[in-house]
Image: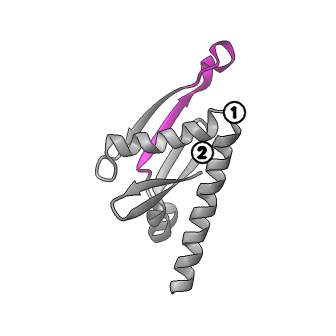
Amino acid sequence: FLCALPRREGYEFFVGQWTGTELHFTALINIQTRGEAAASQLILYHYPELKEEKGIVLMTAEMDSTFLNVAEAQCIANQVQLFYATDRKETYGWAQLLAIHSTLIHLHQRVRK
């Protein structure tokens, strides 16, 4: 899962990887420089026990405050919620737009090299 976090001069991209019911995020730059040794900067813990009965999934988070503040972690969590917790078609259109935008940035960086 790829999401964009607004920064003062553009966006910083965070990559999320599911491990069971946990979603681990780290900045894309950390993955590019540290590879598999890149530590999680935000972990979203999901508790699906009430999904069938109540139609909800509880979530809590753990973050590394040297990289993210609470508002930034909430921004990432909101993007996850928009993508996974809604059935609205416009949400998927937004996710596709974000994917296209990140691809264009990647291509632009490759051209500049």
Q: Residue at position x 53%, y 43% from top?
A: 79
Specify whether 90 is left or right of 60: right
Specify whether 94 is left or right of 37: right
Report helix, strand or loop for mark 1: loop
Q: Is residue 54 above or below residue 27?
A: above
Q: Residue at position x 67%, y 45% from top?
A: 92
Q: Is residue 48 above or below residue 87?
A: above
Q: Nearer the viewer, mark 2 or mark 1?
A: 1
Q: Nearer the viewer, residue 5 or 21?
A: 5
Q: Amino acid at mark 2?
A: Trp
Relative image position of residue 44 (x, y in whole percent): 49, 38
- Of the two numbered discs 2 and 1 on the same chain, state the one appearing first in sequence: 2
Mark 2 and mark 1: span between their CA atoms? 20 Å
* Magenta region, residue range: 40-57
Q: Residue furthest front?
A: 90
Q: Residue furthest top?
A: 53
Q: Amino acid at mark 1?
A: Asp
Q: Which colour assignment does the render follow?
A: one colour
Q: Nearer the viewer, residue 40 or 92?
A: 92
Relative image position of residue 63 (x, y in whole percent): 37, 43
Q: Is residue 102 above or below residue 59?
A: below
Residue with the mark numbered 2? 18
Relative image position of residue 38 (x, y in whole percent): 45, 60
Q: Nearer the viewer, residue 14 or 92?
A: 92
Report helix, strand or loop for mark 2: strand
Q: Nearer the viewer, residue 10 or 21?
A: 10
Residue with the mark numbered 1? 87
Q: Residue at position x 37%, y 46% from top?
A: 72
Relative image position of residue 10 (x, y in whole percent): 41, 63
Is 20 colored magenta in this rendering? Answer: no
